[in-house]
Image: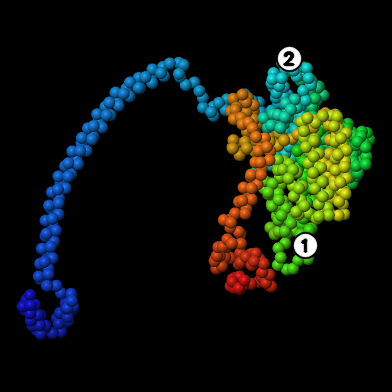
Amino acid sequence: MNSYLRKKASMAKQAFKQTTGRKRQQLDNKVYKLTVRRMETESVDALMAEVERCQNEVQEWKRKYADLEIEKEKFYDEMKNEINKLGEEITDLKHVNKDLDAYVEALEQKETLKCKGKTLNQSRTNLNKTYHIEKTAGEYPGASISFTSTLREHIKELLENSPELKDSTIQVKLSGDGARMSRTTNFMIMSFSLLQLNESVMSPKHNRTVAIINGPEKYATLKASLSHFFREVNELISKGTITVDGRDVQLQFFLGGDMKFLLMIMGINSATADNACLWCKIHKDDRWDTSRPFSHYNEDPQWRNLEEIKKMCRSKDNFGCINEPLINMPLTNVIPDELHLLLRITDKLLQNVIDEVLERDAEEYFSKTMGQTKGIHLSKLVKVINYLGISFSIWNKKNVDGSESQVKEFTSLLGSQKKKLLNGLPSKLSEVLYPDTCETVQQIWTDFGTLYNQISDFSFCKTAANAIFVQPKSWVELFFSLKGIRPGYTRPRVTPYMHTLVYHIPFFVKMHGCFKKFTGQGVEKNNDEAKRVLFNKSNKWDAAKDTVYTESRQWDLKHHERMKGQYTKRKVEYWNTEISEIRKQKRACCVDSPDTIEDDDIPTPEVNLTNLSVKQLRELIKEKGLRPKGLSKLKKMELTGLIEKA
């Protein structure tokens, strides 16, 4: 190789010497420079050893490859045998399936085993075709069924189940209520129930819906949309009978509902008007006066009547009569609802307790040094109510611009929660109220709880009317005995429900006996059922019609309803007291558990200030309680620096 390179180099040198000018320049362009470093050279012996090693590896691979060929042939034979076995099993299954197919085909030929059923959707559609549901008049969508035929159907079933009522007068209670279903849906639901069913009137199954309007709860809405329904009702009231299976059945109608609905139906002004009582002409400034005898507001000239309302609605001095009554029913048969009486009165009592607690916290905080905790008694009150098993909280009401005001709002409680509150809260009030008036407030709560338990008892009879007048009278006097001492107990705070409790509920008990049978609990549960239908069983295109259809199907298929499992409470003490104590202990353990993390211990996530806008930075500064001058004029860098310093 060296001699070969030497020859080539001498030839190139000789050619270079013999050329000049342009040819030499061409030779210069053909020059190829090659540089080899000392450590990059490889000897021929090393290359030969590498070639020998590669040859050995190839020979070893060929030897192993011969073994792989043998293994492949062996594996192929095993697979072939398995496939043959599976083919034999498939052949056997074909013979078995032929016999099974022949058996199934023979069964299908039998008439008794042929499928004669329909899909659920077909059955529902066919059932809906049997109902005559009409759209209501007026601008708001709605649906209604014939009140007369539906009432006849219910009375017929009642007389079949209770033959002893054939010669009795059937008591029918008409009810109505407005219920907000969703953000865009507000139902006005008209229903009725038969009072001879006793405690079953509290069930939604025995409160039959006859009309639903998807619109606001106003007099004009009812008058325009339900004119046909009110015409049917008034005809039955004037006639006093209905024909069932060729025989006349005597009817007695009642009207029930909350105060807003009753005033609206009978054409009286709202509950905040001067003459807001539906049954008498008392002025709102005189509701506190309980010195009048029992009959004063239940007789002329104070007692209202139907003809008088129709005349006064056209005059100027109308005592709150602004419209004609939609139902021609005597006011002796228009009954207030004991459930709403409980809700509205306890709302006032609870508001008074909260106001007193806020006043006490404000006084104590004024005498404390800076930095001490405020709102101690308000926090205690919330904990006491939560300890009773009631989800309750208090917060500041939001203004229109989204900022917080100083007005307090609290959780709206249900009827069952209000009953728990009446039973458990009075004994705990000593922890949060002023000591000098705490006993009086406790007595107000306890006495009202006793009164409510009496009037909501199904065994309550007419003979207790006088007693039920004396007790509410004393209770109202005890209520405004704290006027000028504690907030919320002044004379104007005596509501229409309190006046009704004193003078009119004893009157209705004396006339009709048991007051609990006129309860509106079944109506409220019926509203919940309508809401469930709206969200689960309706496409919301015509929600009112879907709800009426669903309830009609449930009435027709009531005999196929699934029977609920029966459970007998053998240990009465456990269900009355022990179970509530056990649950209280569990809640206390959850609250006091050391594993729980306090809000202050939770690390707040870091915020990248550079990604926030100027508006967001200003809001963050306000949340931190900073009040720099000229905040609206500060730029983004200045706002960021201000937050970092804070």
Q: Quadrant of residue 210?
A: top right
Q: Residue at x 54, y 29 (%)?
A: 121
Please tell me which of labels 2 and 1 falls first in the chain: 2
Residue designated by label 1: 364
Q: Residue at x 20, y 38 (%)?
A: 78
Q: Is the C terminus in the top left, top right, bottom left or bottom right quadrant? A: bottom right
Residue 104: x, y in percent? Answer: 38, 21
Residue 595 visible (yes or no): yes
- Residue density around tag 1, few if under 14, some if 14–19, many if 20 or more, within 10 Å: some
In the visual, does 579 lie left or right of 357? left
Residue designated by label 2: 246
- Residue density around tag 2, few if under 14, some if 14–19, many if 20 or more, within 10 Å: few
Q: Residue at x 65, y 38 (%)?
A: 574
Q: Is residue 562 placed above or below 392 in the rendered structure?
A: above
Disc 2 is placed on an element classified as loop
Residue 223 visible (yes or no): no
Residue 414: x, y in percent? Answer: 70, 42
In the visual, does 641 lie left or right of 99? right
User: Which sits in the foreground, 204 or 530?
Assistant: 204
Residue 385: x, y in percent? Answer: 70, 49
Please name the amino acid that badge 1 sits on: Glu
User: Which sits in the foreground, 231 or 458?
Assistant: 458
Q: Is the N terminus in the top left, top right, bottom left or bottom right quadrant? A: bottom left
Q: Is residue 111 placed above or below 49 in the rendered structure?
A: above
Q: Quadrant of residue 310?
A: top right
Please name the amino acid that badge 2 sits on: Gly
Disc 1 is placed on an element classified as helix
Tell me how many marks there are.
2
- Label 2 with label 1: CB-CB less than 8 Å: no
Q: Residue at x 13, y 61 (%)?
A: 54
Residue 397: x, y in percent? Answer: 72, 55
